[in-house]
Structure formats: C-alpha cells, structure tokens
Amino acid sequence: MPIRHDIFPRRRVPGTKVTIPVPPPDLVSRPRLLTLLDEASDAVMVFVGAPAGFGKTVLLADWAHRRGRGGVAWVSADAGDNDDRLLWSAILEALCGCARIPAASPLRQLAVPRAPSTDLGFLAQVAESLDALPGPVLLVLDGTQEITASCVWRGLRALVRHRPAGLRLAVSSRREPPLALVRARLAADLVELGPPQLRFSAEEAATFVRSTGAGIPPEQLGLLVARTEGWPAGLRLAAAAAARSGSLRDFFAGRDQAVLDYLVDEVLAPLTTAQRDLLRAISICDDVPAGLAAALGGRPEAEAMLRELGEPAARVVHSGGTPPQHRLPPLLRTYLRAELLRRAPERTRTLHATAARWFADHDRPASALLHSVRSGNATRLREQLRRHAVTLFLSGDHHVLRLALAVLDGRQVTADPLLALVSAALCLETGDTSAAGLQLARAEAAWPDRPSAELTVLRQLAYSRLAQLDRSPVQAVRAAERVDEELAGHTGLGGLATLQRTGVLIACHERGPAREELVRVLDAAQDHGQDFLVARCLTTLGGLACYDGDYRVMDTLARRVAARCPADAPRRSLEGAQACALLAYGALLRGEPAECVDQAKRIGRLLGDAPARTARNLRLIAETLRGAAEFELGGWQAGLRRMRRARTHLGAGRACPAEHAALCAVLEHRAALRLGAAAQARETVRWAQPMLARSGELLVLRARTQLRLGRPGAASSVLRSLADEEAPMVLPWVAIEASVISVQAALAARAQERAVRFLDHALRTAEPADVRFPFVFAPPDVVAFLTARLGRLGRGERFAGQVLALRRRLHTPPMPAPLTERERSVLRLLPTQRSIDEIAQDLTVSPNTVKTHVRGIYAKLDVRSRRDAVAIALRRGLLDTELTDFTS
C-alpha cells in the first residue's frame, strides 16, 4: 500500500511527552513485578490499572529503561490527547524514536489524517508497518485515564484488533480503558497488574524506607504498612512526613498537611461534593455495614453511592461480603476523620451518637460502646457498660472497655462494684496486679447486700486470677477452688469459671482431664464468639502440650493465639506474651535462633513493667531463651551473660517453677561448658540442685561435666541411670539432648556401635516433635558422625538431612577455643597494666606460668600483644561480667 501524504502533517509534540521518565533517586526496584512484565513478551497487551499513587508510571519507566530505549516507545497521555490527531502524532513520534524502527519504515514518513481513529486506510498502514518490523516494539501509553473521548479509543481498539506482530502495547490508567480487555483475558493475551500486585510488601516497604533515610524505626514498619496497606504514595508521604517532623506521630494522627493536600488533590478531587461529604461522614467508622451509611449521610441513596465508589473506575471504597460492608482505606479514613473533627467537632459527636444508636439497635455492643465513647455521652456509656461489660470482656474487646472506663468519672467506677470488678479483670490481663488490687478494694467497699450471681462469680474469678498470676501455687489452687462453677453456669461466666478451675487439675498433674475440660470450653467459646476465652484456652492447651513434649502442637496453638492479636492491639497483653514465650521456645527447639530472638523481644514489649509474678517470670524465661539463641548465633559471651543474669533474677526455691529452673539450668550449663566457663557451669549446677533433685536434667548436667573433664566412661555411667526411670525428665526434649551426649561419650570411648545405637534413638525420638536444637548445635564430632552416617539412618534419614541443611543455612561462625579458668583469671588482670611478675604475685603462681597462660590467651584470641588481647576481649565480652540491660 502506498504511503499517504495528506495535507495534514503530524502535530508538533513536546519531547517530554515521548520521553521515558527518569525513575526517582530513591527508586525501589521490584523484581517480582518486573518478572511478571518480562513474562508478558508473548502477550498482545499489558494493563497496569490502579488509583493514584500506586507507582504505575515508576514501574513502567523502570521496566522500559531495563528493556532499552531502542525497543520502547513511550507516550505520556494528558487531556490534550482527546484530540485524535495529537495522540496519533505522539504515537508515531514515539515509534520513530525507536532504533528498532528501520530508516526505510513507512512509520517514519506517515502523515496523520484529519480523523485518524476512523481512517481505516491510515490504521491499516500503521498495522502493516508494525507487522514488517524485524522485532516487536513496546508501546507504553501512560496515564490514559486522561483520554475520555470515545473516538480516540476507537483507533486504538482497531490497532489491537489487528494484532500486528511488531507491537506490544502497555497501558496504564486509574480506570479500565475501553479496550477489548475481556476478549484479551479469555485469549490469554493480557497481562494485568492491579492494586493487589502493586502494593508494597513488608520487605519492599523496609527497603524503600531505608533508601529515603527518613529515620523511621524498624518496629514501626509493620504498623506503617498496615495503615497504608502498602500504598506506594502513602509510604512516600510517610517518609516525607518523618523527615520533616522527626517522627510519624503527625502522619498517623492525620495531622500532616502535605498528606491531606495530596489526598484532596489526587484522590478526592475527581469526586462530586455529595460523594466527598458522604465519605467524611462514614470516616468515623472503621467498617460501615449495609444501612449505616444512609443513617450517617442522611441520604437514602448512600448505599448505591458507596457501591459506585467501590467500582474500578473510582476504587475509593472497599466493599465486600454478604450483606455488603464498606471500608475506606485506613490512611484516607484517618485524614478524613481528623479533618472532620477539626472543622466540625459538634457534627463529629452527632455522627458518633448516630452510629452508637445504630450499632446498639443491630446488636453490635462493642461498636456501640466505642461510638458512645467518642460521642462523649457519659450517661449512655455507663448504661451500655452495665449491660454489656461482661460480654465484651469475654469477647476480647478489652481495648474498648478500657476506653469506656477511662471516659467515666473515677467516682462512677468506684461506686459501681460491677465496673470496678471489670476494671480489675482488665488490669489483671495486662499483668498489672497492683492496679487490680486497688480496683478489687473499691469493689469490696461498694459491695451490695444482695449481689447478683454474675457479680458474685465475677469477684471469685478476679481473686482466682490474681492468685494465679501473683501468688504461690498453693494459694492459686485455693482461690480456684473457691470459684462456684454451678453458680457460674447460671451466668455468662460458666466457661471462664471452668477454665479457672482447670488450674486445680493441672496443679494436681491431672493433665488429661484438664485437657478435656479445656477443649470443651474452647468449642463453646468459639461458638459464642468469646475470643478472650478462646485465647486463654489455646494458651493453656499450648502449655500442656509443652509439658507433654508435643512441641508441634504447642507451636500450632501458640500461632493461633498470635494470629488473633491485631497489629494495633494495646501494648500490654499477658496472653500475647505467653503465646510469644511458647513461640520463642518452639523456635529454639526447631533450631531457628533468629526467630527465637524476635519472639523473646516481643515478650518484653507486650509485658512492659507489669509487676505480676507471672509477668516477671515470663520476662526472665524470655531472657534465657534469647540468651541461648544469641549464643548459637555467635554472640557467645553476650548470650551466656544474658542467661546468667536471668537465672540470678529468677531466684531459687519454691519461687521458681521446676520447668523454668530446668530450662535455665540446661541451656546455661550447656553454653558455659562449650565456652570453657567452668566456674559458671558449676554455679549453675549448684543453683539447680535444690529445685531439680532426683530429676533427669540434673543427671544430664553431671554427664556433660564428666564429658568435659575427659571422662566419657563416667558420663555414660551417669546417663545409664536415666534408663531406670527413677529420675524423670522435667523437660521432655532433654531426653534427646541426653541421647546426643551419649553419642558424644560413645565416640570419645571409640564405641562405634553404641554411638550408632544412641544416634538412631535420638533421631527417632526427635523427629515426631521436630526437636532439632540438640543436633543443629551439636559438637563438631557429633555432626561429623551424623554426616558420615547419611544413607544408613533408615527412618531418621529425612530428619537428619533437614538438620544438616539447617546448619548450612545458619552459617554460625565457629566457636573460638575456650579459655581455661586460669587463662580467664590472667585475662582479667591484663587491662590493669600490671607486670608479669605482679600478675604472678596476685595469682600466687610463678611468672613462667603466667607467661604460658598469656601465650595461650594470645593464641586463642589470635593476637600478638596485650593491647590487642584486651581490645578483642572487650569486643567479645570476655571482660564484661555484668549485663546492664536485658530488655533492649
């Protein structure tokens, strides 16, 4: 077909319109999305569709630059492209800028007719010219939501329908363009990226925040991603806000003016006045059930408006479910709510009162109470508390209860025993036994002559829980026995009463009946939506599984509890901390020390400075687990010091449960011997003896000591006494540790067959419980023996392979040769600048002996001078005997 030379030449196009944008300096390249785009090479079309701020242009520009300018034609669309000739002039200009278009291609000479999108001859020439190209060209049309003229889209549809071999079309838009997308989807000719794919993952968000240098603390990243829902513009606005003010406080509170301006200009500007007003009204609610929008907005058509705003053309509202429920994006909701409160505080209170009435009428007490709090109506608030406080406590809506009680005048709570008891119960669930005791005293002072059954049982439960958290085991059992289960059965507190009474069964070691009761209560609580009771049951069942050595079950139950805790839950949570303790323990036993450290840190954040004995013990056990994990990650001295500090604070005698004592002793003693800290190992044994008398753990400590002294026969002899079952294990997994020690002792005694037998037994025992710790961090001779046995381990083959693979992934640095006790004594005196003779005199040894020890220190620290030895010792913590802070 001959080239057409109309009297209409191409329109002049600004160079910036057909130039690929330069990605921003803080670009976070997204390989997962680029890979999806690269895999679209055989597709006719790519569509990147999302509302403003999702990084559509940045992503396509990054992709285009990676493909190379020679094969990419870029057009940035704007409102001017509703002029048909201007758009096609820009398309041809962009194509002619591609090196892949030959100099003789008709595309370089083609003129643009008056109405190109309806000129079939022109469109045919474009398609034929593209078909003749030696390779396909990528044409990117960016921002096509600006093109609203239907006649313009007609030509693009015709071009796509021709499917020229030399063209791949990529379109970005805030709304779905009027192209044949449905047909392309059915033919698998379309690759789509929408908001779900474009949202930043937690890892991408962390990378982006680091690249901006905004100084956002890592612990706030989870909340930031949740509040922005991974919206790229939201993350960028947050980084800018943090850079301006030094924190995210204003950003999270909806007070950053730059964020508000962006939302108004980019998100709200295309909406009508009525739509914007409706969004402001519903912003007071996190979720808007069907029917509530009409009540808040005063518009019968509010539901239809929200559905329209949830369609792909707008995507300002998220709608779903049956019946439908609507929700604004968290960041938009926060800023609309803050703006409404600033500009119309009275209207805000009125809207909350309307919402409170609506939720109360629809049997949603938690939401009704929350909006009553925000409306400031104390009378209505007190009425709702008296009616629903116990129900909300059992359902786990503790945050709402705390807000409501905080709003009421203190005298109103003091004068009402029900409110005082609920307040005490809430304090107990954060471990604040001091505040709980004060509230119990207030309840007693206002106690009625004829209390209701609910009030009586609630008081019994409060005292039982207080004893469980802060008294001796004997006192806890006595208090639990006073709970009247029969009376509780006539109230809504029956399940909680049974749960509290299971503590008696557990204390009497009747774990089977306790478990049956807990499962029964759990099932009923799940049926009635009593989430707090569900979490308590799961945590207690997880503890029982831990006692029994069912560590897989323990971990599963603890994860169920953790999953029920929202990301923005209040800081303190005793139940959450107990779940994290089980998760930290499980992670250590699985040989995953990094996860153990993370969970142990969370325990400290969830407990704060709660004074309850249970909270204190949890903090110290968390420190023990964290110290053991840090030790295995290569922080040998720091980890060992952390464990010692936790043990000394944990105390001894009846104050320390046997399970806690066993865990502390086994982990610290093991680490101390491996590092050559014999004195600390002896100290640990002395501490544990009164609490672990006649236990298997104490025999394990003795066997380890004998092995460390080079007496494998004595170690084996000690461990053989475990077989008579007169020394039961407090911690089931330590039996596996004992088998590994037996392997080591047999290897040292060159008893190969015995080593094989013990290794097979250890693997068979460890695999069902997924206990990898004794193998992953075993001494080198045991690891070498395990490796040599591969292919001959039978049922343990798969588990052994997993253990060795985990060892390789951890890349734990080799442990330095341990210093002897005498070398440690000499090392402690090196920083004092005493001479060799003076050190010898202090230690009552000869100078030659001191010189020998100094040479040993130099060799083990790989140094050549006293100054370097002191520096290395300080860096490794060998000279620091106290841990100043074990909460950081």
Image: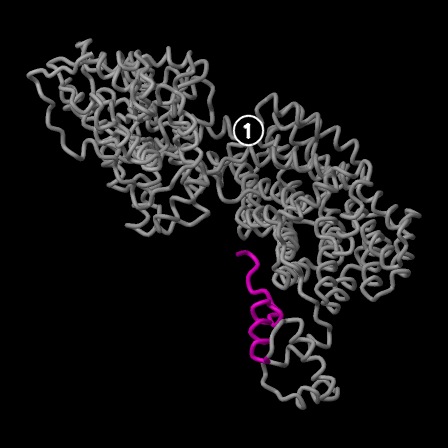
Q: Residues within 10 Å of mark 1 (few under 14, many from 20)?
A: some
* Figure label count: 1
Q: Residue at x 68, y 27 (%)?
A: 521
Considering every residue shown, the one lying at the far left of the view is: 7
Is 36 drawn above or below residue 626 in the view shown? above
Q: Which image quarter holds the N terminus? A: top left
> Is 517 colored magenta in this rendering?
no
Q: Residue at x 34, y 18 (%)?
A: 165
Is 180 drawn above or below residue 870 in the view shown? above
> Is 882 colored magenta in this rendering?
yes
Q: Is residue 192 left or right of residue 25?
A: right
How far from the left and from the top, in percent, is residue 498?
Answer: 70, 31
Q: Is residue 588 left or right of residue 225?
A: right
Which residues are drawn in magenta?
A: 865-888
Is 295 drawn above or below residue 340 in the view shown? above
Viewer can see residue 467: no
Mark 1 highlights which residue?
Answer: 395
Considering every residue shown, the one lying at the far right of the view is: 724
Q: Residue at x 74, y 84 (%)?
A: 849
Is 334 drawn above or below residue 215 in the view shown? above
How far from the left and from the top, in percent, is residue 229?
Answer: 40, 33
Q: Nearer the viewer, residue 173 or 536?
A: 173
Quadrant of the rendered image containing residue 443: top right
Q: Secondary structure at mark 1?
A: helix
Q: Nearer the viewer, residue 611 or 779?
A: 779
Quadrant of the rendered image containing residue 712: bottom right
The amino acid type, in three-letter code, at marker 1 is: Ser
Viewer can see residue 128: yes
How far from the left and from the top, in percent, is residue 687?
Answer: 76, 62
How far from the left and from the top, in percent, is residue 71?
Answer: 30, 31
Q: Is residue 327 left or right of residue 446?
A: left
